[in-house]
Image: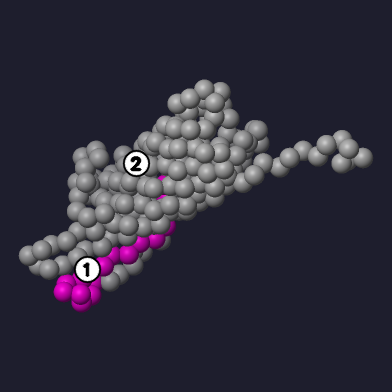
Amino acid sequence: MRSLLLSLLIVPSLLNAQTARTGPRLGVGLATISAGQFLEWNGLPKVGPLFGWSFEIPWAAQASFLIEPMYITKGSLVQNAQLRTWTSNRLGYLELPVLIKFSLQNDPGGIYLAGGAIGGLWMNGRYKVKQDGNVLTDQKYTVSGTSNRTQVSLAAGMGWDIGTSAFEVRIQQSVTPFSPVIRGQNLVVGLHYTYYLPAKKEKSKKEED
């Protein structure tokens, strides 16, 4: 919790640097909860939205920092054919990804790779069980008073930057356990789209006159 709040306090100071581009980031995630193994898929994909804001801060000719506060849906969807049940587990997280973006060509844009770490805070969730279309269990998680709401994830992605827009496929997995007993990890494959707002053009001296 403290590390996430510290990161949120650092963001404004980083944004005081020359910011190349900024804009909304939207997408959809395909999530699962693994049994503890890295990149282990379990059950069916739990589809959920993700949205936030992207700040790209220049670092080098082909590299920059991506700081992207966002809300993302995680969880799992498991079918039991014998019991004819569907178990849905939705977990909503407020996250702060801090990644390095590296362009594969000399000029900015085109194909790029991205990777880094993500700090997350569990905000809400819902657990639902259906059998033959009938709801057996439907309950919201109570996060207030929960001692273990923070989560650290690692992320890697590949994208295509075309100037005003960027498309990216990003894989992220948590590396901190829910508890000493529950060893599952959140794994999300996200399809991201970012629209970069047009840069403000400086007024010419003639216009100022």
The residues colored magenta run: 120-137
Q: Is residue 2 visible?
A: no
Secondary structure at numbered mark 1: strand
Left or right of 132 in this view: 58 = right
Q: Which residue is mark 2?
A: 171
Q: Residue at x 12, y 68 (%)?
A: 84
Figure check: 39 above or below 128:
above
> Is the stretch drawn in magenta largely helix, strand or loop?
strand
| Residue type pointed to by label 1 | Val
Q: Secondary structure at mark 2?
A: strand
Residue 48 location, quadrant: bottom left
Q: Quadrant of the C terminus?
A: top right
Mark 1 sits on what residue?
129
Instruction: Please tell me which residue is depicted at 67% across the width and 41% down the height of the picture.
Output: 199
Q: Residue 126 magenta-drawn? A: yes
| Three-letter amino acid code of the residue under disc 2 | Ile
Percent across and percent down for residue 112 are 44, 32
Q: Which residue ends up furthest to the left in the rendered image?
A: 82
Q: Is residue 23 above or below residue 62?
A: below
Q: Residue at x 20, y 77 (%)?
A: 134
The disc label shown at residue 3, or none? none
- As drawn, 78 above or below 108: below
